[in-house]
Image (cartoon, rainbow, N blue to C red):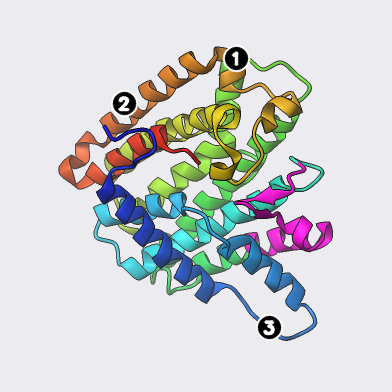
Amino acid sequence: MPSPREADPDLQKAIDENAAAVSKTMEHLLPQTDDAEKRLFNAMRYGTLGGGKRLRPFLVMQSAKLFNVDVSRAKRAAAALEFIHCYSLIHDDLPAMDNADTRRGQPSVHRKYDEATAILAGDALQALAFEILSDNQTHEDPRIRCHLISSLAKAAGGHGMCGGQMLDLIAETEDFDVGSISRLQRLKTGMLMAFACEAGGILGRADEAHRKALRGYAHDLGLAFQVTDDILDVEADPSETGKPANQDEAAGKATFVSTLGKDQARMRAEMLVAQACRHLNVFGARADMLKKFAHYVLERRA
Protein backbone atom coordinates (compact mmCIF):
# COMPACT_ATOMS: atom_id res chain seq x y z
CA MET A 1 0.00 0.00 0.00
CA PRO A 2 1.12 3.62 -0.57
CA SER A 3 2.02 5.65 2.52
CA PRO A 4 -0.88 7.42 4.28
CA ARG A 5 -0.15 10.63 2.38
CA GLU A 6 0.25 9.10 -1.07
CA ALA A 7 -2.75 7.79 -2.99
CA ASP A 8 -2.30 5.21 -5.73
CA PRO A 9 -1.04 7.31 -8.67
CA ASP A 10 -3.53 5.82 -11.17
CA LEU A 11 -6.38 6.42 -8.76
CA GLN A 12 -5.25 9.97 -7.99
CA LYS A 13 -5.03 10.74 -11.71
CA ALA A 14 -8.54 9.35 -12.23
CA ILE A 15 -9.92 11.36 -9.28
CA ASP A 16 -8.30 14.58 -10.53
CA GLU A 17 -9.50 14.11 -14.10
CA ASN A 18 -13.00 13.26 -12.92
CA ALA A 19 -13.11 16.30 -10.63
CA ALA A 20 -12.16 18.57 -13.53
CA ALA A 21 -14.72 17.04 -15.89
CA VAL A 22 -17.60 17.08 -13.41
CA SER A 23 -16.73 20.60 -12.23
CA LYS A 24 -16.93 21.77 -15.85
CA THR A 25 -20.37 20.17 -16.16
CA MET A 26 -21.46 21.82 -12.89
CA GLU A 27 -20.28 25.22 -14.08
CA HIS A 28 -22.24 24.76 -17.30
CA LEU A 29 -25.39 23.76 -15.40
CA LEU A 30 -25.27 26.55 -12.80
CA PRO A 31 -27.46 29.52 -13.69
CA GLN A 32 -26.09 33.02 -14.20
CA THR A 33 -27.94 36.30 -14.50
CA ASP A 34 -27.46 40.04 -14.34
CA ASP A 35 -30.91 40.47 -12.80
CA ALA A 36 -31.49 41.64 -9.23
CA GLU A 37 -31.28 38.08 -7.84
CA LYS A 38 -27.73 37.58 -9.13
CA ARG A 39 -26.44 37.59 -5.53
CA LEU A 40 -28.19 34.23 -5.06
CA PHE A 41 -26.58 32.71 -8.14
CA ASN A 42 -23.18 34.10 -7.18
CA ALA A 43 -23.53 32.42 -3.78
CA MET A 44 -24.53 29.13 -5.45
CA ARG A 45 -21.45 29.23 -7.64
CA TYR A 46 -19.21 30.23 -4.73
CA GLY A 47 -20.49 27.31 -2.67
CA THR A 48 -19.97 24.73 -5.42
CA LEU A 49 -17.07 25.73 -7.66
CA GLY A 50 -14.48 26.64 -5.03
CA GLY A 51 -12.71 23.29 -4.90
CA GLY A 52 -13.44 19.87 -3.52
CA LYS A 53 -12.32 16.42 -4.61
CA ARG A 54 -15.75 15.49 -6.09
CA LEU A 55 -15.52 12.05 -4.46
CA ARG A 56 -19.24 11.28 -4.75
CA PRO A 57 -19.27 12.18 -8.46
CA PHE A 58 -16.24 9.91 -8.86
CA LEU A 59 -18.33 7.02 -7.53
CA VAL A 60 -21.15 7.89 -9.93
CA MET A 61 -18.79 7.92 -12.89
CA GLN A 62 -17.06 4.69 -11.91
CA SER A 63 -20.30 2.83 -11.25
CA ALA A 64 -21.66 4.08 -14.59
CA LYS A 65 -18.52 2.81 -16.30
CA LEU A 66 -19.31 -0.72 -15.10
CA PHE A 67 -22.43 -0.67 -17.28
CA ASN A 68 -21.09 1.31 -20.27
CA VAL A 69 -23.31 4.31 -19.53
CA ASP A 70 -22.94 7.33 -21.82
CA VAL A 71 -20.42 9.65 -20.16
CA SER A 72 -22.46 12.83 -20.68
CA ARG A 73 -25.44 11.27 -18.90
CA ALA A 74 -23.27 10.06 -16.05
CA LYS A 75 -21.76 13.53 -15.63
CA ARG A 76 -25.21 15.09 -15.31
CA ALA A 77 -26.18 12.62 -12.58
CA ALA A 78 -22.83 13.20 -10.88
CA ALA A 79 -23.32 16.98 -11.00
CA ALA A 80 -26.83 16.68 -9.56
CA LEU A 81 -25.51 14.64 -6.64
CA GLU A 82 -22.68 17.10 -6.01
CA PHE A 83 -25.16 19.98 -5.93
CA ILE A 84 -27.06 18.14 -3.19
CA HIS A 85 -23.81 17.55 -1.31
CA CYS A 86 -22.77 21.19 -1.65
CA TYR A 87 -26.16 22.41 -0.48
CA SER A 88 -25.77 20.22 2.62
CA LEU A 89 -22.34 21.71 3.33
CA ILE A 90 -23.66 25.26 3.00
CA HIS A 91 -26.44 24.52 5.48
CA ASP A 92 -24.11 22.48 7.74
CA ASP A 93 -21.87 25.53 8.19
CA LEU A 94 -24.71 27.80 9.33
CA PRO A 95 -24.71 29.09 12.92
CA ALA A 96 -27.77 26.95 13.69
CA MET A 97 -25.84 23.81 12.70
CA ASP A 98 -22.03 23.56 12.95
CA ASN A 99 -21.39 27.32 13.01
CA ALA A 100 -18.28 26.97 10.82
CA ASP A 101 -16.54 30.07 9.53
CA THR A 102 -14.48 28.26 6.87
CA ARG A 103 -14.95 25.56 4.26
CA ARG A 104 -12.13 24.23 2.07
CA GLY A 105 -9.85 26.91 3.46
CA GLN A 106 -12.18 29.75 2.41
CA PRO A 107 -14.93 31.68 4.21
CA SER A 108 -18.12 29.61 4.35
CA VAL A 109 -21.03 30.87 2.25
CA HIS A 110 -22.85 32.58 5.13
CA ARG A 111 -19.62 34.38 6.07
CA LYS A 112 -18.90 35.43 2.49
CA TYR A 113 -22.47 36.59 1.90
CA ASP A 114 -24.98 36.34 4.78
CA GLU A 115 -27.11 33.71 6.50
CA ALA A 116 -30.28 34.33 4.50
CA THR A 117 -28.43 34.15 1.19
CA ALA A 118 -26.70 30.94 2.29
CA ILE A 119 -30.05 29.33 3.14
CA LEU A 120 -31.49 30.33 -0.23
CA ALA A 121 -28.38 29.17 -2.09
CA GLY A 122 -28.69 25.72 -0.49
CA ASP A 123 -32.40 25.55 -1.27
CA ALA A 124 -31.81 26.55 -4.88
CA LEU A 125 -29.03 23.97 -5.33
CA GLN A 126 -31.30 21.24 -4.05
CA ALA A 127 -34.01 22.25 -6.53
CA LEU A 128 -31.47 22.46 -9.35
CA ALA A 129 -30.32 18.89 -8.70
CA PHE A 130 -33.79 17.48 -9.32
CA GLU A 131 -34.32 19.78 -12.31
CA ILE A 132 -31.20 18.24 -13.87
CA LEU A 133 -32.31 14.66 -13.23
CA SER A 134 -35.77 15.35 -14.66
CA ASP A 135 -34.36 16.57 -17.99
CA ASN A 136 -34.36 14.09 -20.90
CA GLN A 137 -30.68 14.91 -21.51
CA THR A 138 -30.01 12.83 -18.39
CA HIS A 139 -31.87 9.88 -19.91
CA GLU A 140 -34.48 9.51 -22.64
CA ASP A 141 -36.50 6.98 -20.63
CA PRO A 142 -38.79 8.81 -18.15
CA ARG A 143 -38.86 5.72 -15.92
CA ILE A 144 -35.09 5.91 -15.49
CA ARG A 145 -35.31 9.62 -14.72
CA CYS A 146 -38.05 9.01 -12.14
CA HIS A 147 -35.97 6.25 -10.58
CA LEU A 148 -32.99 8.60 -10.24
CA ILE A 149 -35.17 11.35 -8.76
CA SER A 150 -36.86 9.01 -6.30
CA SER A 151 -33.58 7.44 -5.18
CA LEU A 152 -31.83 10.78 -4.65
CA ALA A 153 -34.84 12.23 -2.84
CA LYS A 154 -34.84 9.30 -0.40
CA ALA A 155 -31.07 9.57 0.09
CA ALA A 156 -31.26 13.30 0.82
CA GLY A 157 -34.47 13.51 2.85
CA GLY A 158 -35.77 12.62 6.28
CA HIS A 159 -34.89 8.93 5.91
CA GLY A 160 -31.42 9.85 4.64
CA MET A 161 -29.07 12.80 4.95
CA CYS A 162 -31.48 15.20 6.68
CA GLY A 163 -32.53 12.54 9.17
CA GLY A 164 -28.88 11.86 9.88
CA GLN A 165 -28.24 15.55 10.43
CA MET A 166 -31.09 15.62 12.96
CA LEU A 167 -29.48 12.72 14.81
CA ASP A 168 -26.17 14.60 14.64
CA LEU A 169 -27.77 17.54 16.44
CA ILE A 170 -29.33 15.24 19.04
CA ALA A 171 -25.92 13.64 19.61
CA GLU A 172 -24.69 16.96 21.01
CA THR A 173 -26.86 16.51 24.10
CA GLU A 174 -27.47 12.75 24.34
CA ASP A 175 -25.12 9.80 24.71
CA PHE A 176 -24.93 7.62 21.60
CA ASP A 177 -23.53 4.10 21.57
CA VAL A 178 -21.70 2.61 18.58
CA GLY A 179 -24.92 1.30 17.06
CA SER A 180 -26.57 4.72 17.24
CA ILE A 181 -23.50 6.43 15.81
CA SER A 182 -23.42 3.90 12.96
CA ARG A 183 -27.09 4.60 12.15
CA LEU A 184 -26.48 8.35 12.31
CA GLN A 185 -23.62 8.11 9.85
CA ARG A 186 -25.39 5.62 7.59
CA LEU A 187 -28.13 8.21 7.15
CA LYS A 188 -26.03 11.37 7.12
CA THR A 189 -23.17 10.17 4.93
CA GLY A 190 -23.90 6.65 3.73
CA MET A 191 -27.18 7.29 1.92
CA LEU A 192 -25.65 9.76 -0.53
CA MET A 193 -22.73 7.37 -1.00
CA ALA A 194 -25.23 4.63 -1.78
CA PHE A 195 -26.94 6.80 -4.39
CA ALA A 196 -23.55 7.64 -5.90
CA CYS A 197 -22.81 3.95 -6.39
CA GLU A 198 -26.31 2.98 -7.50
CA ALA A 199 -26.80 5.85 -9.96
CA GLY A 200 -24.60 4.18 -12.57
CA GLY A 201 -26.58 0.98 -12.20
CA ILE A 202 -29.87 2.85 -12.60
CA LEU A 203 -28.64 4.63 -15.72
CA GLY A 204 -27.30 1.35 -17.09
CA ARG A 205 -30.43 -0.69 -16.26
CA ALA A 206 -28.37 -3.06 -14.08
CA ASP A 207 -30.02 -6.18 -12.69
CA GLU A 208 -30.82 -6.48 -8.99
CA ALA A 209 -27.81 -8.65 -8.16
CA HIS A 210 -25.35 -6.07 -9.47
CA ARG A 211 -27.18 -3.18 -7.83
CA LYS A 212 -27.23 -5.10 -4.54
CA ALA A 213 -23.46 -5.52 -4.78
CA LEU A 214 -23.05 -1.78 -5.30
CA ARG A 215 -25.35 -1.03 -2.34
CA GLY A 216 -23.29 -3.32 -0.11
CA TYR A 217 -20.08 -1.65 -1.23
CA ALA A 218 -21.55 1.80 -0.63
CA HIS A 219 -22.88 0.90 2.82
CA ASP A 220 -19.48 -0.26 4.10
CA LEU A 221 -17.60 2.48 2.26
CA GLY A 222 -19.84 5.19 3.73
CA LEU A 223 -19.22 4.01 7.29
CA ALA A 224 -15.48 3.68 6.66
CA PHE A 225 -15.48 7.20 5.23
CA GLN A 226 -17.09 8.59 8.37
CA VAL A 227 -14.82 6.67 10.75
CA THR A 228 -11.78 8.15 9.00
CA ASP A 229 -13.48 11.55 9.07
CA ASP A 230 -13.79 11.24 12.85
CA ILE A 231 -10.11 10.31 13.08
CA LEU A 232 -9.13 13.27 10.89
CA ASP A 233 -11.17 15.59 13.10
CA VAL A 234 -8.84 14.89 16.02
CA GLU A 235 -5.47 14.41 14.36
CA ALA A 236 -5.34 16.09 10.94
CA ASP A 237 -3.76 19.47 10.23
CA PRO A 238 -6.42 22.13 9.54
CA SER A 239 -4.21 23.45 6.72
CA GLU A 240 -4.78 20.11 4.95
CA THR A 241 -8.47 19.62 5.76
CA GLY A 242 -9.48 23.25 5.17
CA LYS A 243 -11.60 23.31 8.35
CA PRO A 244 -10.97 23.68 12.09
CA ALA A 245 -9.81 20.64 14.07
CA ASN A 246 -11.70 19.03 16.96
CA GLN A 247 -15.08 20.45 15.91
CA ASP A 248 -16.97 17.36 17.08
CA GLU A 249 -15.27 17.31 20.46
CA ALA A 250 -15.96 21.02 20.95
CA ALA A 251 -19.63 20.41 20.18
CA GLY A 252 -19.77 17.46 22.58
CA LYS A 253 -20.74 15.04 19.82
CA ALA A 254 -20.31 11.30 20.17
CA THR A 255 -18.13 9.90 17.39
CA PHE A 256 -16.49 6.59 16.54
CA VAL A 257 -13.24 7.96 18.00
CA SER A 258 -14.75 9.24 21.25
CA THR A 259 -16.62 5.95 21.72
CA LEU A 260 -14.05 3.40 20.52
CA GLY A 261 -10.74 5.25 20.73
CA LYS A 262 -8.51 5.98 17.72
CA ASP A 263 -6.94 2.54 17.44
CA GLN A 264 -10.21 0.64 17.54
CA ALA A 265 -11.82 3.16 15.19
CA ARG A 266 -8.99 2.69 12.68
CA MET A 267 -9.36 -1.10 12.91
CA ARG A 268 -13.08 -0.77 12.26
CA ALA A 269 -12.42 1.35 9.18
CA GLU A 270 -9.99 -1.25 7.84
CA MET A 271 -12.54 -4.01 8.38
CA LEU A 272 -15.25 -2.01 6.59
CA VAL A 273 -12.99 -1.33 3.60
CA ALA A 274 -12.19 -5.04 3.29
CA GLN A 275 -15.90 -5.85 3.36
CA ALA A 276 -16.65 -3.15 0.80
CA CYS A 277 -14.12 -4.61 -1.63
CA ARG A 278 -15.54 -8.12 -1.30
CA HIS A 279 -18.93 -6.88 -2.48
CA LEU A 280 -17.30 -5.90 -5.79
CA ASN A 281 -15.91 -9.33 -6.62
CA VAL A 282 -18.95 -9.97 -8.82
CA PHE A 283 -17.60 -7.34 -11.26
CA GLY A 284 -14.10 -8.83 -11.54
CA ALA A 285 -11.26 -6.57 -12.67
CA ARG A 286 -13.70 -3.94 -13.95
CA ALA A 287 -14.18 -2.78 -10.34
CA ASP A 288 -10.48 -2.42 -9.53
CA MET A 289 -10.69 1.38 -9.45
CA LEU A 290 -13.57 1.25 -6.96
CA LYS A 291 -11.51 -1.10 -4.78
CA LYS A 292 -8.57 1.31 -4.94
CA PHE A 293 -10.94 4.10 -3.95
CA ALA A 294 -12.02 2.17 -0.86
CA HIS A 295 -8.39 1.93 0.27
CA TYR A 296 -7.94 5.62 -0.55
CA VAL A 297 -10.61 6.37 2.07
CA LEU A 298 -8.27 4.92 4.69
CA GLU A 299 -5.26 6.89 3.46
CA ARG A 300 -6.77 10.33 2.89
CA ARG A 301 -5.58 13.27 4.95
CA ALA A 302 -8.36 15.71 4.09
**Residue nearer the viewer, 166 or 130:** 166
**Residue nearer the viewer, 4 or 249:** 4
Q: Amino acid at mark 2?
A: Ala
Label 3, label 2: how far apart the Cα atoms are: 48 Å
Q: Secondary structure at mark 3?
A: loop
Please say whether residue 70 is one of the residues in the magenta stretch. no
From what the image shows, is residue 89 above or below residue 257?
below
The quarter of the picture where residue 45 lies is bottom right
3 or 1: tag closer to the N-terminus: 3
Using residue 231 as the reference point, say whether residue 17 is left or right of it. Answer: left
Q: Which mark is residue 274?
A: 2
Q: Amino acid at mark 1?
A: Thr
Q: Secondary structure at mark 1?
A: helix
- Whether the residues at callouts 3 and 2 have beta carbons within 8 Å, the answer is no
Figure quadrant of the N terminus: top left
Instruction: Please tell me which residue is depicted at 66% across the width and 17% down the height of the picture.
Output: 176
Query: From this viewpoint, is residue 205 visible?
Result: no
Instruction: Please tell me which residue is depicted at 53% across the width and 72% down the height of the picture.
Output: 27
2 or 1: tag closer to the N-terminus: 1
Q: Which mark is residue 33?
A: 3
